Amino acid sequence: MDTQSAIKLPFNLKIIPVNDSGFPIGIPFLAMFNPENLAIKEDIDWTANCASGSAGSDMHYKGTKPRTFTLELTIDGTGVNTNGVKIPVTAQVALFRAATTGVQGLLHHPAFLLVQYGLFINTCVLNSSTVTYTMFDMFGLPIRAKISASFTERTIATLSNILGMLSSPDLTHRRTVKQWDILPYLTKEIYNNQHYYLQVARVNRLKNFRKLQAGQEIVFPPLADK
């Protein structure tokens, strides 16, 4: 491998098999070429509540689904990017499958994955992959291929707990009022229940909770135990 390729290699996309806590447990797959495209999809789940005999409906938030993303990798066995050293395409595909689809003995299922490319770092699972062989030598052996792979993001339990704590109604929250904000709406955002707005107004000594001033800070204290 030439010096320029060797310098660039550590910055190429990596797929690292990890356990359920996010610790590496196997040999990572290092892409020979970085993907030209990285497509990230986000889905928000809404439900429509339509009263009988009425037209139209309001939408109510149910949850945000895990992000999915797809990428396409080029596998080359001609030695064009390895200073003439020809790494068989079949061996590179085997390394990809070992990292992404091989059943891990301790887990009894394929490993969870950590995909890292530049500032994009994602813990995920592989949904599917397709290997398309695009070039062959005179003996019919593949010398170039493309791997199309799709992944679903996963949130590690410890990280999920931390994020949940940061948005918990058991903690004190502060919000800066924006134009047109109303107290019942802000209260519902924090406690998922707008009926605490009178208590919030009392804590903040608001003389008129119906007319909040843009820029003022509202304190939302933790809910008291019953």
Image (cartoon, grey):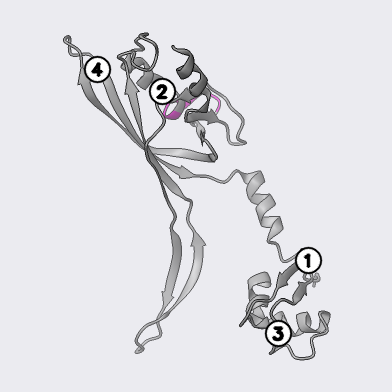
Q: Can residue 143 be seen in the rendering of this structure?
A: yes
**Secondary element type, mark 1:** loop
Determine contact: label 1, label 3, CB under 8 Å: no
Number of the label disc, if any, that sits on residue 212: 3
Q: CA distance from mark 2 to mark 1?
A: 49 Å
Q: CA distance from mark 2 to mark 4?
A: 16 Å
Residue 193 falls in image quadrant: bottom right
Q: Which residue is mark 4?
A: 142
Name the amino acid, label 3. Leu
10 Å crowding of disc 3: few (<14), some (14-19), many (20+): some
Does label 2 or label 1 sit earlier along the sequence?
2
Does label 1 or label 4 sit earlier along the sequence?
4
Residue 219 falls in image quadrant: bottom right
Determine contact: label 1, label 4, CB under 8 Å: no
**Secondary element type, mark 3:** loop
State the image coordinates of residue 141 (x, y, percent, origin top left). Answer: 22, 13
Number of the label disc, if any, that sits on residue 5: none
Residue at the image point whose x is 34% and y is 13% from the top:
79
Q: CA distance from mark 2 to mark 3?
A: 57 Å
Left or right, 102 with respect to 156, comes to: left
Does label 4 or label 3 sit earlier along the sequence?
4
Q: Tell me: residue 106, above or below residue 64.
A: above
Residue at the image point whose x is 40% and y is 85% from the top:
51
Q: CA distance from mark 4 to mark 3?
A: 68 Å
10 Å crowding of disc 1: few (<14), some (14-19), many (20+): some
Left or right, 173 with respect to 13, comes to: right
Determine contact: label 4, label 3, CB under 8 Å: no
Q: Which residue is mark 2?
A: 32
Q: CA distance from mark 1 to mark 3?
A: 20 Å
Q: Which residue is mark 1?
A: 172
Does label 2 or label 4 sit earlier along the sequence?
2
